[in-house]
């Protein structure tokens, strides 16, 4: 009916207005939110091994609870930072949080536990990521072997935009991993990169693995291929 269509149009306009307000306020407030933990924080998710009996690594997660709009999605934070010229500042905030986490792990006798952080294709293509990461680790006194950089399949498939940066990081003994493997197109091509040391299979392939023969076949095939191309054993994310 015309009434329901009209209500639908009103709802769409209100939703769009809220999205635009959130984006505008995020652009305005991001710089302050990055200062001294005044909003933007780095959280850490444990990655377990041996059936959940061993802490294998930690994964850095970017979080921002805006005082007006609530939680801002990480992908929006990356886009806002890029649009306002703050990508490098945001990357340094993440690196500072990761470095502090590594220091705490060392103090707890867990120096063997690596900490992983994700770098987006946009950051990888536009920023001197290798210089920023290695400089930050040197300043913080953190061993490069304690860090893992996660890149997406998009970056791995367009390796020419990041090859020299990944080479410099790998040469400095920073581990490189492909995150959420299997969600992009031509995924198997990304296994050919000489810089990759770990593969994280997308959660959609490993959920209900025991009940899905097709998923078991796909995961087994990826594992077998990864043994040829990846320097260390593949770990199945979500298991």
Image (spheres, grey):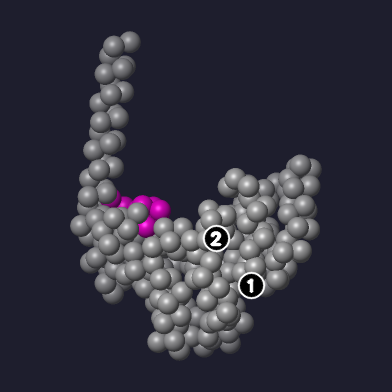
Q: Is residue 236 above or below residue 53?
A: above
Q: Quadrant of the C terminus?
A: bottom right
User: Regarding mark 1 in the picture, which secondary structure is present there?
Assistant: strand
Residue occupying image coordinates x 22% and y 52%: 25
Image coords of residue 123 (percent x, y) = 41, 62
Mark 2 vs mark 1, CA separation in Å = 28 Å
Q: Is residue 75 magenta?
A: yes
Crowding at mark 2 (Cα within 10 Å: few <14, some 14-19, many 20+)? some
User: Regarding mark 2 in the picture, which secondary structure is present there?
Assistant: helix
Q: Which residue is mark 2?
A: 159
Q: Earlier in the sequence, mark 2 or mark 1?
A: 1
Residue occupying image coordinates x 48% and y 85%: 142
Q: Is residue 101 magenta?
A: no
Residue occupying image coordinates x 57% and y 79%: 171
The region drawn magenta spans: 69-78
Q: Is residue 57 left or right of residue 1?
A: right
Between 200 and 42, the residue placed more toward the observer is: 200
Q: Is residue 148 above or below residue 110?
A: above
Image quadrant where residue 146 sits: bottom right
Image quadrant where residue 64 sits: bottom left
Q: Which residue is mark 1?
A: 56
Q: Quadrant of the N terminus?
A: top left
Image coords of residue 27 (percent x, y) = 24, 56
């Amino acid at each position: 009916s015309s009434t329901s269509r009209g209500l639908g149009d009103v709802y769409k306009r209100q939703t769009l207005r809220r999205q635009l307000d959130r984006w505008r306020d995020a652009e305005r407030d991001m710089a302050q939110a990055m200062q001294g933990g005044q909003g933007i924080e780095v959280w850490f998710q444990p990655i377990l091994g041996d059936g959940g009996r061993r802490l294998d690594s930690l994964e850095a997660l970017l979080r921002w609870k805006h005082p007006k709009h609530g939680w801002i999605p990480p992908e929006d934070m990356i886009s806002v930072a890029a649009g306002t010229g703050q990508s490098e500042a945001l990357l340094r905030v993440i690196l500072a949080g990761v470095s502090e986490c590594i220091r705490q792990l060392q103090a707890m006798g867990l120096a063997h536990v690596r900490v992983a952080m994700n770098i987006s294709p946009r950051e990888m293509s536009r920023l001197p990521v290798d210089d920023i990461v290695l400089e930050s680790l040197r300043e913080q006194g953190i061993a490069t072997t304690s860090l893992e950089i996660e890149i997406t399949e998009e970056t791995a498939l367009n390796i020419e935009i990041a090859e020299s940066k990944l080479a410099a990081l790998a040469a400095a003994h920073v581990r490189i991993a492909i995150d959420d493997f299997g969600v992009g197109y031509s995924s198997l091509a990304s296994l050919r990169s000489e810089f990759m040391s770990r593969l994280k299979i997308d959660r959609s392939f490993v959920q209900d693995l025991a009940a899905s023969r097709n998923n078991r076949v796909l995961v087994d095939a990826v594992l077998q291929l990864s043994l040829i191309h990846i320097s260390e054993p593949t770990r199945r994310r979500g298991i």
